[in-house]
Image: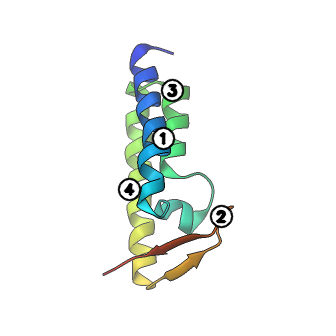
Amino acid sequence: MGPATRAADALIRVYQQRLSPRKGWTCAHLVAHGGQSCSAAVRDVVVNRGVARSVVPTVARFVACYQAASMLAATDVQGVCCCGGIPIPFRFRR
């Protein structure tokens, strides 16, 4: 793992540990489709492919997350989501 990959991995890990828990909800892609959160998926791609070769998959994942957020917002979802291991409160506003 090169220095850029190690740095990106460390930044994503800090985001996951420090910032993401403070948001109060997980990414829309995980809520809508299950699987990994966007940060976990991007972290896996960065570690396995390196920074340069992970740009396109990362952008594709964020686009998919945006589309999932739009879909959830259109359904006026609110309350508690039990899609993950822990119920996660969320609300999307229009």
Q: CB atoms at circles 2 and 4 under 8 Å apart?
A: no
Q: Residues within 10 Å of mark 4 (few under 14, many from 20)?
A: few
**What residue is rendered at 56% in x and 27% in y?**
48
Q: Residues within 10 Å of mark 2 (few under 14, many from 20)?
A: few
Q: Earlier in the sequence, mark 1 or mark 3?
A: 1
Q: How far across and down, in percent of the image, does residue 68 sit?
A: 45, 67
Of the residues shown, which amino acid type is indicated by label 2? Answer: Ile
- Residue at image mark 3: 49
- Residue at image mark 1: 42
Of the residues shown, which amino acid type is indicated by label 4? Answer: Val
Image quadrant where one finds the C terminus: bottom left
Image quarter of residue 30: bottom right
Q: Earlier in the sequence, mark 2 or mark 3?
A: 3
Tell me the CA gap for discs 1 and 3: 10 Å
Task: Name, please, the residue furthest toward the top.
Answer: 2
**What residue is rendered at 44% in x and 44% in y?**
18
Q: CB atoms at circles 1 and 3 under 8 Å apart?
A: no
Q: Secondary structure at mark 2?
A: loop
Q: Secondary structure at mark 4?
A: helix
In the rendering, which numbered label is found on residue 86?
2
Q: How far across and down, in percent of the image, does residue 10 sit?
A: 45, 29
In the rendering, which numbered label is found on residue 63?
4
Tell me the CA gap for discs 4 and 1: 13 Å
Task: Name, please, the residue furthest toward the left.
Answer: 94
Q: CB atoms at circles 4 and 1 under 8 Å apart?
A: no
Of the residues shown, which amino acid type is indicated by label 1? Answer: Val
Q: Secondary structure at mark 3?
A: helix
For the residue pair 24 and 93, the one nearer the viewer reads as: 24
Q: Earlier in the sequence, mark 1 or mark 2?
A: 1
